[in-house]
Amino acid sequence: MIFNRKIYGKFLEWKRMGGQKALLVEGARRIGKSTIVEEFARNEYKSYILIDFAKARDVVKEAFVNNLDDLDTFFMLISSEFKVKLHERQSLIIFDEVQKFPRAREAVKYLVQDGRYDYIETGSLISIHENVADIVIPSEERCIKMYPLDFEEFCWAFGEEQLLDYIKLCFEKKRPLTNDLHRKAMMLFRQYLLVGGMPKPLDVFLENSRDFIERIL
């Protein structure tokens, strides 16, 4: 299941800048970086290519080493490998797990300056800062941190937008929630404390038993 995430709005703000910089999304493992980036690519671009450097073939990696001085050939090789047609200013190229192949991160300088496509990188917090000894970090890169789902995003997953609006209204007016809605809000908060904000456990919880935690509280 793809969850509604606040960071999506920040992706839209970045896209409106028109490819001036690549976007590096960094955060802990398993918080949904790749999922939300690919959802953004699917919704907001005519086409996209996702290069997962955890399993990219040698022909892809060699393109970053041998063909950056001829970007026409570079894009032809990447497009052919993934069988995706790229459209100028309407396509996104994703460097997933970029920390596993730092040469791709270094190449961002030339790719952004070329200006044909947009670029998003994803990387895990620790290794993204460790694997940079032999590369020049591009200034054409904007970093943004991503975190597990917060309580508001957790409630969105349950379709509780109206309850959230009511909580905000009560906060603004400095008045208590009604007893029934306070109990409901506290139940959701307890569920959040037990399930947490990692997408996979939440997905399993939603699919299998929404009332499981209610039975054990």
Image: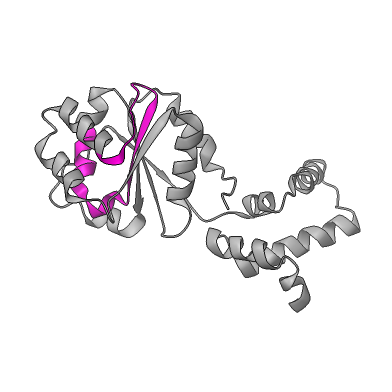
Q: Is residue 84 left or right of residue 56?
A: right
With 31 as the anchor, is 157 left or right in this view?
A: right
199 with respect to 114 (left or right): right
What is the span of residues highlighted in magenta in the rendered image? 81-109
Task: Tell me how the rendering is colored.
Answer: one colour
Q: Position of residue 86 (x, y in %)?
A: 33, 28
For this view, does 8 lie left or right of residue 79? Answer: right
Give the residue displayed 78% in from the left and 44% down from the top: 162
Q: Give x and y (percent) for residue 191.
A: 69, 66
Residue 155 within the segment the image draws in magenta: no
* Residue pictured at 66% horizontal, 52% vertical: 157
Nearest to the observer: residue 177 or residue 114:
114
Residue closest to the eye, 63 or 124: 63
Position of residue 78 measured from the top left corner of the image (x, y, whole percent): 24, 37
Q: Is residue 12 above or below residue 52?
A: above
Q: Position of residue 175 (x, y in %)?
A: 85, 48
- Where does the C terminus fall, quadrant-wise? bottom right
Q: In the image, what residue occupies the spot 19% across and 30% down?
A: 110
